[in-house]
Amino acid sequence: MRKLIAPLLGAICVIGAIGCAGSDSPFVDAHNPRVRFLNATSLPTSTTVYSDDEKIANELAFGAISNEAILTNGNHMIDVRNSSTNTTLKKTEATFELDEWYTLIAYTGNDGLTKLVNTRDNKEQTEGKMEVRVVRATDQYGDVDVYIYPTGDPLPSTPTFELGQTGQSTPQIALDLNKSYTLRIFRDGETTGGFSNENVFANSMRNIVFYFTRNAAGNDTLLEFNE
């Protein structure tokens, strides 16, 4: 029976095609997971990332995001390295599923160590709307309140969303394209002295994701990207 396992697995890979293919395989198609990497660490130099010893992001400075890599579905060993010294900052396993897009976010934890969170991107979009969400990529503070409101309006009496644990994402919110909006983040229950920079955005025909994190200088910041 053991001699039959390898041929059988080979047949399954050919039939399933996309499930067993690598990023350079002729079987790769639109169903394979797409994975990109965001460097949100406080490391003064850049980071390079490997998936199972295959480089998927090269020398990314703080706030930079890589192109999407095409991977097989299933578990992959992710190795985040200091680009200058090639030493490993964080090595951990991550799981990716078919028909999904992911962003791996490396950030510096409150203990000074590099942490990695795996978040799913949101590709759904409401026609004629601007879709926005916020992802937490810091373990500083406790819960935080997220406010999204038309620029020029007073701060709403209640937050739009609340974020607790690191890696948590707010739901997607559909906004009008012909308006400018303000995003502010406060400590839970507070409405003054927001510790993230106020961010004003408008008229994007693509989904926007804001990553709430801490930069190399130790300041809280919002990184804005399209999904």
Image (cartoon, grey):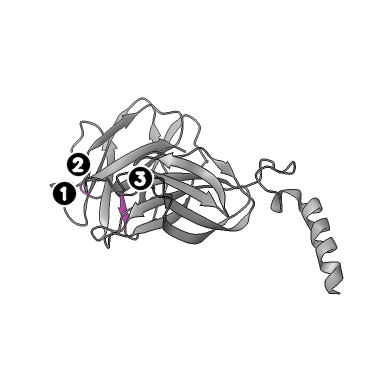
Q: Position of residue 172 (x, y in %)?
A: 42, 45
Q: Taking 202 as reference, is 19 above or below it?
A: below
Q: Nearer the viewer, mark 1 or mark 3?
A: 3
Q: Position of residue 154 (x, y in %)?
A: 18, 38
| Residue 160 seen | no
Q: CA gap, disc 2 to disc 3?
A: 21 Å
Q: Helix, strand, or loop for circle 2?
A: loop
| Residue 70 seen | yes
Mark 1 is on which residue type? Thr
Q: Nearer the viewer, mark 2 or mark 3?
A: 3
Mark 3 is on which residue type? Tyr
Q: Helix, strand, or loop for circle 3?
A: strand
User: At 76% from the left edge and 49% from the top edge, which residue is drawn?
Assistant: 17
User: At 66% from the left edge and 45% from the top edge, which residue is drawn?
Assistant: 31
CB-based contact (under 8 Å), mark 1 and mark 2: yes
- Callout 2: few (<14), some (14-19), or many (20+) C-alpha neighbours within 10 Å? some
Q: Which residue is mark 3?
A: 211
Q: CA gap, disc 1 to disc 3?
A: 20 Å
Q: Nearer the viewer, mark 1 or mark 2?
A: 1
Q: Which residue is mark 2?
A: 155
Of residues 218 and 147, the one nearer the viewer is 218
In the rendered structure, find residue 18 and report the number of the disc placed on it: none
Q: Is residue 32 left or right of 144 when viewed as pictured? A: right
Q: Which residues are magenta?
A: 157-164
Magenta stretch contains residue 83: no
Q: Which residue is mark 1?
A: 191
